[in-house]
Image: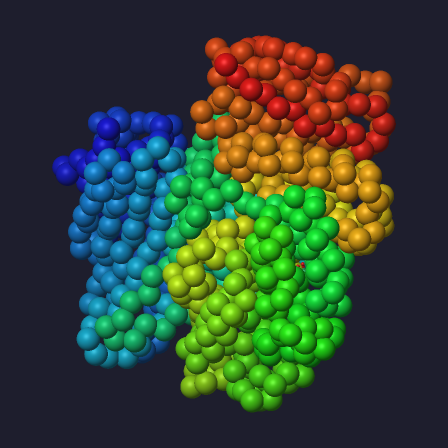
Amino acid sequence: MSLAEVDESSGTIALFPAGTSYVVRIEPDRGTVRHVHWGDRLALREAVALPAEPGPGDSFGDPWDGAEELPVDGGLRYGPPALEVRYADGTGPLEPHLVGFEVERGGDAWAEVRVNLRDAARPLDWTLHYRVHAASPVVERWTEYRHGHPSGADVLLVRHASAQWNLPVRSDYRMSGVFGQWAGEFALQRRPLAVGETTLTSRRGHTGHQSNPWVAIDAGEATETDGQVWCTATATSGSWRIEAVRSPEGRCGVICGAGHEGVEVSLAAGTSWTSPVSVGVYSAAGFGGVSRALHAYVREHVLPAPERPRPVLYNSWEATSFEVTFANQRRLADAAAELGAELFVVDDGWFGRRDDDRAGLGDWTPHRRRFPDGLRPLSDHVHGLGMRFGLWVEPEMVNVDSDLYRAHPDWVLHLPDRTPSVQRHQLVLDFSRPAVTDWAYEWLSRTIGAYDVDFLKWDFNRSFSEAGSHGDRRDRRAIFMEHAEGVHGVLDRLRRDHPRLEVESCAGGGGRVDLAVLARTDQVWTSDNTDAVDRLRIQYGFSQVYPAQVMSAWVTDSPNPMTGRTIPLRFRFHCAMAGALGIGGDLTRWSRQEREEAAGMIALYKEVREVVQHGRQYRLGSPDDLQHGVLYVSRDRSEAVVLQWRVGAATRTLQPRLRLPGLDPDAVYTLHDDSGTLGSVSVTGAALAAHGLPAGLPAGPYSSRLLRLRGR
Ligand code: DGJ
C-alpha cells in the first residue's frame, strides 16, 4: 500500500500514515494548499469526491479561515499567520503563488511530499514538507524558507512556523497540555479551548518546565481509551510557540514553530532557514492511542540508540550534594554496585573550585582538593566494580567566579548596555558562537577520553536574560533558537566521535525535554522532585508525550529531602520502576534490610525492564483515582508488566476491576503478583481485557505491587 497518492486532475495529495489519512489539495488559482482531511482512513478517490467546504457567505468572512496548511499574512486572512514577513522597504503582506509540488518515496518505508510556494514579485520562496513512515500514524511537517535572490536586502521572517495543523469542524474543542514549574513538571491539564488564540510558549531559550511543546485537541468527548484525539509536538529545544486558534465561527487550528513572539529570522540573499519538525498524530483510540503512537515514533524515528536497555544508574546528587570527594564517591560506588547498579554518576561538584554553586562552572578540570589524583582513580574503581562511569556537566553555563569568565567575559549572552541578571551565580554562554561550541566540544571530548566517561548528565540550570550575542551580532533575538542549535551541534559531534557515549538531558529536572533533544540523548532527568507520590503525577503527565525508556526515575531517601514525606521503600521502587530506574539516595545510611530489599527490587527490574522500556504503554486510571497503574505490553505480546499504586488507605468502596487491554486475546497468561495478593492465576488475554482482575492492592496506605504476565 502506497504511503502517498496524488490525483493530478483535482490537485489532491493523500498521505496514509498507519490506518489514517492526511489529505490536502493544491489550489493553483488561489496560490494555497487547502487542508481537506485528517482522521480515519479515506481512500484517495473518496477524498477527491468530498464536496468542498462552503465559504463564509458574507463580505466580512475569511474564505481560508482554518483551511490552509500554512496561512500567510496577506489577502482576506484575519487569523494569526503562520508566515509573516517584513521586506526591506517595510512592506509585509504576502501574495502566495503555487510553484509546484513533488512526491518522493523511499520504497515502502517512507514518503515525502514537498509543495513549493513563492511570494509574487518578491524574493521569498517556501516549501511545505510532509513525511510519513510505514506503520506510524505520525505526520512530520516542517517548512523551509528561502531568500530567492542571489543579491539584495535581507528578508525578515517575523513569523516562521513549522506548520498549521487543522482539525475537522466539531461542535466543541478541548485542549490538553502538560504544565508546571521546577520540581513540579508535566502536570496534565485538560480544559475546554476558549474562542480566540491560546498560546503555549517558552520565552526562556530552553524548552521549559512551565509548558512542554505538546498539545492534544479533542471534541470534549475522548477518554483514555476511546474517541478521536489529534495531537502535535514540536522538535525544538530553544524558545517555541504553539498557538491553538478557535475561531468564533467554530474552526480549530494549531500553529507550531520555534521562537517566541519577536524572535525573528533574518534571511540574507541566497540563504535559507529550515523550521524544526512538528509532528502530528491522530488516533481514534483516545488519549492512550496518541501517546502510544508518539512513544513508538520516538523509539523508531527519534532516539539515536533506542534498542539499548537503559542501565540502572546510581547518582550521587541527593547523597553528597556539592561535597563529592574521591572517598565518599568510592564508598557510594561500592554500595551501588552491591545493589546491582550498572552505571555510577558523579553529580555536581567534581571540578574547578566548585565548593558550592558560587564558583567553578566553566573550569572543567578535577577539583584539586577533592580529587588530588584526578578522576582516573575513581573511574577505574567504578569500572573495576563492573559499572559504567558517568559525569555531571553543565557546559552552557559559567560562574562569574571562574577562570573561564575572567578570560572570556564576552562569551556570555549579554547586552553591553544592560546589567546582566545573574541567577544561581551563573550566566549563560553563547552557544551560537563557534568559538564557544568548539571550546565546549574540545573539553568534553577530552574529558570523556581522559576518564573513560561512558555517560554524561548534561544539565542547564537557568533561563536566558539579556539574551544578546556579544560577538558581532548584538541583540539578535534569534539567539533564543540558535543557542539550542549550538547545543545540538556539540551533542551530535560528541556522539559521532564517542559512539558508546550515553547522555541524559537535564535542565534543573525536566526543563529540557523535547523531541529535538531526544534525537541526541538517551534519557532525560524528569524532575528534581523525587518524592514518589509527587512523581506519580509527574510521570503520568510525562507519559502523555514521552516513552518510559527515556524517563529517568530515582529511588531516594525517606523522608524525602525535598518534601519531607515518608514513603516505604517498596512503593518508591514501584514508582521509579515505571521508567528508567535509578538510585539517588545516600546508600551509606540505608540499613542492611533496606539494601537487601533494594537489591531484590533492582534484580526484579532487570527482569522486566525490556517490557517496561520497550513495550507499549497503557495508562490504567490516573493519579486522581484512589488507585491507578500502568501496563506495559511487550511488542510480541508474550509478556506484560503492571505497576499499580494507591497512596491513601483503602476505602470500603469497591475499586473498578483492573482490565488489561493490548494483550493477545488468545494467549493464556500466567500471573505473578509481587505483593502476593492475587495468588496464582492463569487467564486469557481476552478475559483480562473484558473482565479483568480484582483491583485490590494490599491494605494500608502507600500500597503498591508489580504484576508480571507471561503468555503462552
Ligand atoms: C539540577 C539537577 O536537576 C540536579 O539533579 C543536580 O544535578 C543539580 N542541578 C546539580 O547542580
27 vs 207, left or right, is left
Residue at x 36% of width, y 28% of height = 19
Q: Position of residue 479 (x, y in %)?
A: 47, 72
Q: Position of residue 651 (x, y in %)?
A: 84, 22
- Image quadrant assignment for residue 408: bottom right
497 vs 368, left or right, is left
Along the line of sight, which residue is nearer the eye, 267 or 711? 711
Q: Position of residue 150 (x, y in %)?
A: 19, 75
**Residue 707 in view:** yes
* Residue farthest to the left, as pictured: 9
Residue at x 39% of width, y 63% of height = 497
182 vs 665, left or right, is right
275 vs 516, left or right, is left
Residue at x 23% of width, y 72% of height = 270
**Residue 210 in view:** no
Residue at x 54% of width, y 50% of height = 523
Q: Dividing the image into 4 quarters, which one contains the N terminus? A: top left
Along the line of sight, which residue is nearer the eye, 326 or 440? 326
Q: Position of residue 454 (x, y in %)?
A: 52, 58
User: Is 457 drawn above or below residue 702 in the view shown?
Assistant: below
Q: Quadrant of ligand 1?
A: bottom right
